[in-house]
Every structure is written in C-alpha cells, then in structure tokens.
C-alpha cells in the first residue's frame, strides 16, 4: 500500500543526506546509500586501472625503441665481422708472399703488415665495445618485459577480480534491501543504485574484454621477443667465440711476422757478407 506524505516531507523525501530529525530513514536505507558510495568508488578504481594501462603502453613503446636499436647494433656487428674477415684474409696473403720471396723488393711489405695488425687490433676493440653494449641492451630488454608482465598480472588478477567480486557482492546486498523496503525513498535509491550498478558492470565487462585482448597480444609479442632474445644471446656467444678465435690468429700472425722479420734480417746480413767477400 502506498504511504501518504505530508507537504513538508514531499520536498525532502528524496534528499538522502537529510538528518533523521526531518526524515526517518530506516537503517537499511542508510546501507543502500552507502552502497551507492562504494559503487562509485569502484568506478573510480576502474578509471585508475585504465590510466595504468596507458602507462603500460608507454613502457611497451620504449621497449620497441630499444628493440630497434638492438637490430642496428647487430647490423653493425655483422659489418665489423665482414671487415675483420677481409683483414685476416689480406694478412694471410701478405704472409704467404713474404714467405715465398724474402728479397729486397718485398721489404716494404712488413711495414704494411704492421699497419694491418694495428688496424685489426682497433677493429677488435670496436667489436668488443659493441658486444658489451649489446649484452647490456639485452639485459635491459628482459628487465622491461618482466616489469610489463608483472603489471599486466596485477591488472588481470588483483585489481580486476577484486572489483568484480565487489560488484557481485553489492548486487546481492542491494536485492535483499530492496525486497525488504517499500518506501518512496527506497524506490528512488533503487533507481540510482540500479543505474550505478549497470554502469559498473558494463565498465567491468569492457575492461575485462580489453585486458584479455591486451594480454593475448602481449603474450604473442612476448613469445616473439623471447625467441629474438635467445637468438641475440646465441649471436653474442658466437661473437665472443669468433673474437677469441681472431685473437689467437692475431697472436699467431704477430709471432710469424716477428719470425719473418728475423729471417729477412738474417738474409740481409748474409747477403752483405757475401758481397764483401766478392769485393
């Protein structure tokens, strides 16, 4: 049965902030008012998650920049490798020529060989510097992925699930209060709470779909990046092996060069002695 209201009550019955002296509001309606506040706080939390998602996207953009820089470094390393291979090939060719003919006409070649060895040492230093930079970049990239993974994990499990649980709990409590109250205050609060509840549920649903899509995209991208990082690590190890191998070749070449210098000097001394005997 519909309750009759006095003229005074007519202007204030929907003001849920009115004191009990003016409006006698049952305790359950107080709880319904509190539910509205809680639900609005939940929607603020949803907005906060959306802001965090944008920050996560910025982190992903930074990682993409780092990844592009890594590709450039790999290209630089490959160019250095080709240059070193060519230098070693030229070095071996010069050794062969000096070994086959130790005459005076080939005396300038040891000087060129010294310059070649010096140049090769500089290239080794450059490639070692790039290798160090590459190792640091890979480490930074892995750290960045771990941070984004942890952030998305928090969104997916902690915050979103907590919000969904709160909305579900508020919905059940709202139904119980609404069934036990049949006043116009209750009806007005019911309409407000119903609207807030629908909006919150829709926002949560939208957020859940967006987070799931984001997680799938991220997992796919992370798998690709993980494979790339493994390839980069393998290239890094291969590069370290090649540098070690080139270093050994350089030491062998230097020793052989010293031996050839001694042989050339002995040959000059021997020729000078023979020339003096002839005179």
Image (spheres, rainbow, N blue to C red):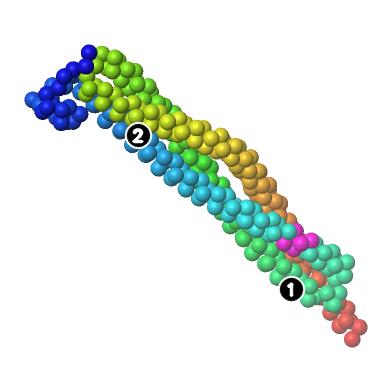
**Residue drawn at point x = 67 percent, y = 50 percent:** 239
Answer above or below: position of 114 versus 151: below
* Mark 2 / mark 1, whichever is N-terminal: 2
Measuring from the top left, give residue 59's x and y in whole percent.
48, 46
Q: Which mark is residue 140?
A: none
Q: Left or right: 215 with respect to 15?
A: right
**Residue drawn at point x = 25 percent, y = 13 percent:** 180
Q: Which residue is mark 1?
A: 111
Q: Considering the numbered disc 2 on the image, is that residue within a helix, a strand or a loop?
A: helix
In which quadrant will I find the N terminus?
Answer: top left
**Label 2–label 1 contact, CB within 8 A:** no
Magenta-colored stretch includes residue 87: yes
Residue range highlighted in magenta: 83-89
Q: Left or right: 107 with respect to 141?
A: right
Answer above or below: position of 201 versus 86: above
Q: Left or right: 22 with respect to 179?
A: left
Measuring from the top left, give residue 84's x and y in whole percent.
72, 60
Most foreground residue, 177 or 75: 177
Most foreground residue, 87 or 273: 87
Q: Which residue is mark 2?
A: 43
């Amino acid at each position: 049965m519909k309750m009759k209201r006095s003229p005074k009550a007519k202007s204030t019955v929907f003001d849920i902030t009115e004191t009990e002296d003016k409006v006698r509001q049952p305790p359950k309606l107080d709880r319904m008012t509190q539910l509205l506040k809680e639900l609005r706080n939940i929607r603020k939390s949803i907005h906060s998650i959306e802001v965090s998602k944008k920050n996560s996207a910025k982190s992903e953009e930074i990682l993409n920049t780092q990844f592009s820089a890594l590709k450039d470094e790999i290209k630089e390393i490959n160019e250095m490798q080709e240059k070193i291979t060519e230098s070693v090939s030229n070095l071996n060719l010069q050794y062969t020529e000096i070994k086959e003919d130790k005459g005076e006409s080939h005396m300038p070649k040891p000087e060129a060989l010294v310059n070649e060895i010096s140049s090769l040492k500089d290239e080794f230093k450059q490639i070692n510097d790039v290798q160090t930079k590459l190792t640091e970049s890979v480490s930074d990239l892995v750290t960045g992925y771990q941070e984004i993974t942890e952030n998305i994990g928090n969104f997916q499990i902690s915050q979103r699930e907590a919000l969904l649980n709160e909305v579900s709990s508020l919905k059940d409590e709202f139904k119980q209060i609404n069934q036990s109250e049949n006043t116009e205050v209750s009806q007005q609060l019911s309409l407000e709470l119903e609207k807030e509840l629908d909006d919150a549920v829709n926002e949560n649903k939208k957020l859940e779909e967006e987070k799931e899509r984001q997680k799938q995209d991220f997992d796919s991208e992370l798998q690709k990046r993980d494979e790339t990082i493994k390839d980069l690590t393998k290239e890094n190890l291969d590069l370290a092996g090649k540098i070690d191998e080139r270093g050994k070749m350089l030491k062998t070449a230097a020793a052989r060069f010293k031996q050839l210098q001694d042989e050339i000097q002995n040959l000059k001394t021997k020729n000078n002695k023979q020339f003096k005997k002839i005179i």
